[in-house]
Amino acid sequence: MFGRERVELKTPEQILKMREAGLLTHAALESVRAALRPGITPAELDAVGAEVIRAGGGTSNFLGYHGYPATLCISVNEVVVHGIPGDRPLEEGDVVSVDGGAVVDGWHGDSAFTAIVGEPREPGDVELVETTRQALWAGIAALDARGRVGDVGAAVEDAVGGRLGIVDGYTGHGIGTAMHMAPDVLNHRDRDKGPKVRPGMVLAIEPMCTRGGVDTDVLADEWTVVTSDGTRAAHWEHTVAVLEEGLWVLTAPDGGAAELGARGVRVPSE
């Protein structure tokens, strides 16, 4: 641990264990992505992801977290995050964000993606999803400079470039022996630059963007976060380890090699 935020630093051996959790998380989310189609319900998708985590020998870090009732958060259209999987069938053109994680031997993985069901309804939905995805990778790449954690938010803001709203009040986070740990990882510039980036840090980076404003409301279920103006939202996330020799995206099957390599960032071979 170091600094005022008591950031948990991991050993290389512990990061290897987190890689197992990250790959299982990836497998669960990819199974959901493959099952996305008009007519399927979020509850059915939740069952798909839950089975992959169970079969892989892990447990869900969402199920039961502060009483959360499902394995995944599945957020549709104006729902930004924490959507509880329900029984309303998905429709052609829905924008769906899927967020989930797995625990293996006490170590956590956490990841999210956004996809459009079938054909998009509006070109703006395509830009929403892709710009948010690019902002995620820009934020991850910013860690390579070994500056401050706040550099992630600056990179996300620059990548979005004012084309979308960056959701206010929800951040990325440290991750390891718990799903949510210090430090907070903002998705915008801030006067507080946060702790110095050091080897052994593992962070969940997760920009959330909208086609409209940045304000949100929480519904009566005390979980579901929606855009105040009803515009659609996207959410992307990866768990990223900072190593002596570079960055390692624990929830990406290639460790982030393709996306980070294109940005000139070192990714160690496994």
Image (tube, helix red, strand yellow):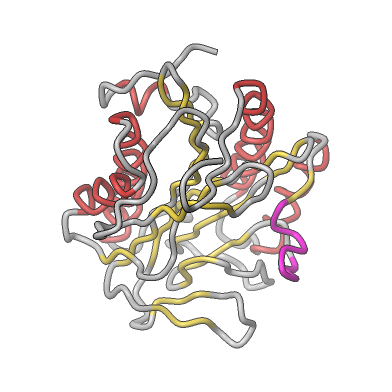
Placement of the C terminus among the 4 image quadrants = top right
- Rendered location of residue 62, percent (x, y): 69, 57
- Position above or below: 159 against 63: above
Q: Is residue 63 magenta?
A: yes
Q: Give me the residue at 38% from left, 23% from top.
A: 258
Residue at the bottom extreme, as displayed:
220
Magenta: predominant secondary structure element?
Answer: loop
Q: Residue at x 72, y 57 (%)?
A: 71
Q: Quadrant of the N terminus?
A: top right
Tally the numbered discs.
0
The percent position of residue 236, horizontal first and vertical second, equals: 44, 50
Residue 14 location, quadrant: top right
Residue under the image location 72 percent in, 69 percent down = 66
Compared to residue 73, the image places residue 198 above or below, namely: above
Where is 21 relative to 99, above or below?
above
Magenta-colored span: 61-69
Front residue of 121/11: it is: 11
In front of the other: 10 or 31:
10
Residue 42 x %, y %:
64, 63
In the displayed structure image, the side of residue 207 where residue 213 appears, left or right: left
Left or right, residue 90 beside residue 147: right
